[in-house]
Amino acid sequence: MKKKVVSMLLIATMTTAMFAGCGSSSDDNQGGADASDNTQSGSADADAGGGSGELENVSLTMWGAEEDQAMLQEMIDAFKEEYKDKANFDIKLGVCSESEARDNITTDVESAPDVYAFASDQIQTLVAAGALQEVTLNPEAVIEANGGQDAGAVKAATVDGKLYAYPETADNGYFMYYNKEYFTEDDIQSLDQMMKVAADNGKKITLDYTSGWYLWSFFGGAGFELTLNEDRSNTCNINGTSATGVKGTDVLQGMIDVCKNPGFVSLQDAEFVTGLNDGSIIAGINGSWNAEAAQKAWGENYAAAKLPTFTCGGEQVQMGSFAGYKLVGVNPYSKFVGHAMMLADWITNEANQKKRFEVRGACPSNVEAAKADAVQEDIALAAISAQSQYAVLDGVQSDNYWDPMTALGGICIDGNSNQEDLQKLLDNAVEGITQPVAGE
């Protein structure tokens, strides 16, 4: 698919059809403006109306998560009020979660919404599909506001040295929730000790072994590498020896031993929340989206921290993690690319990142918004910050990463009951992980 850049003349009118699984808009994106006229190379206050003396009619569609709809509508209303003298805005809001954005957008990029939120691990695919417009509206200001060129959020929004999205949150990672009624500050330093405490009290701690996202905590912490190649395939060395001298077979044995421990159980996300509520789970590795559930279940005993160490080859190894971000992108096929960038910039600015924290508890990527006392005092967000030094950027894995890791996790859950050779298991996993990506 040939990607449209901002300087191109008006393309054909977008169709109104949206995709299964996401909300749709009745807006037909009629407007008649040359896309180049809408690009704001300077301030967002620049006149986007075409200079005719009459305000231009600008129709936009935007997708966001279902749980964010009311908040996003407030942001849209404020945007329309702020720029009412620049254009007559008609903005339709549809439903699509950040996790599903890539699959729905790339089904038909030309018919996709003008503005949409997505998880940072999807950016490579979206750029390759021609579904993201390079940020040309004050990119330097966006970069500076979110911590500079070396900040994780900016790196997550950048492909081949170009900024392709607006950072929105910096909380898409995981850490250890724990109930202070059972654990001391010393206990939470060691996974072995936490499992002992849990078993002694007839309780469990948990991590989802069916997800390669969480399983990387063992390999990543031990210094193994997972990188995404230019052809979208992976390079992965978990079947060898890491840069820190740890054998992959020792990591895998450590993972199996965790599953065999009477104080541990592998639970997926919904099951984790159920365990919080019924009292069977007193600690677990999970993300900030379940902070409210944990706080409600444990009350004044609610706490969170970085991940602990685990036993690997007779040594204690700090667990690592993936760090992810939520981003907002603009469709280059929008008839109103400049106005769409104005909207994307607006809903991710400092004030609205503060609002997102207040309403949804999301950690701001904007450095000024993150300085707020309430953000600094948030237990879950403090744990994300503490874990960040042991995290690598989510998005370094191709689609071929997930199934082999899920299979490996299943063998761990089963305790490797068939006594399969650990080296062979890792060799098979790496063979699958590093396969060329279909269609590349």
Image: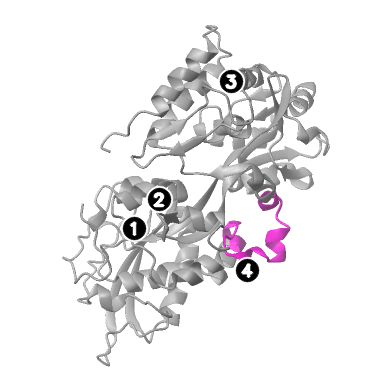
First in residue order: circle 4 vs circle 2? 2
Residues rendered magenta in the picture: 357-382
Marks 4 and 3, how far apart in space?
A: 42 Å
Instruction: Give the distance between the C-alpha atoms of the residues marked 4 and 2, in whole angstroms.
Output: 25 Å
Residue 167 badge: none
The tag earlier along the polypeptide, 3 or 1, is 1
Is 221 on the left or on the right of 399, as rendered?
right
Give the numbered dot on residue 123: 2
Name the amino acid, label 2: Ile
Say what amino acid the circle numbered 1 marks.
Leu
Q: Looking at the image, do the residues carrying marks 4 and 1 touch, with CB atoms under 8 Å apart?
A: no
Q: Which residue is mark 4?
A: 368
Q: Which residue is mark 1?
A: 132
Q: What separation in Å lies between label 2 and label 3 (alpha carbons)?
A: 30 Å
Closest to the observer: 346 or 218?
218
Mark earlier in primary sequence (2, 3): 2
Residue 357 makes an appearance in the image: yes
Q: Secondary structure at mark 2?
A: helix
* C-beta proximity under 8 Å, tags 2 and 1: yes
**What residue is at 46 percent from the left and 71 percent from the top?**
346
The three-letter code of the residue at mark 4 reads Glu
Instruction: Please give the residue where the numbered disc 3 appears in the rendered image.
Output: 252
Helix, strand or loop for the magenta stretch, by majority: helix
The amino acid marked with disc number 3 is Leu
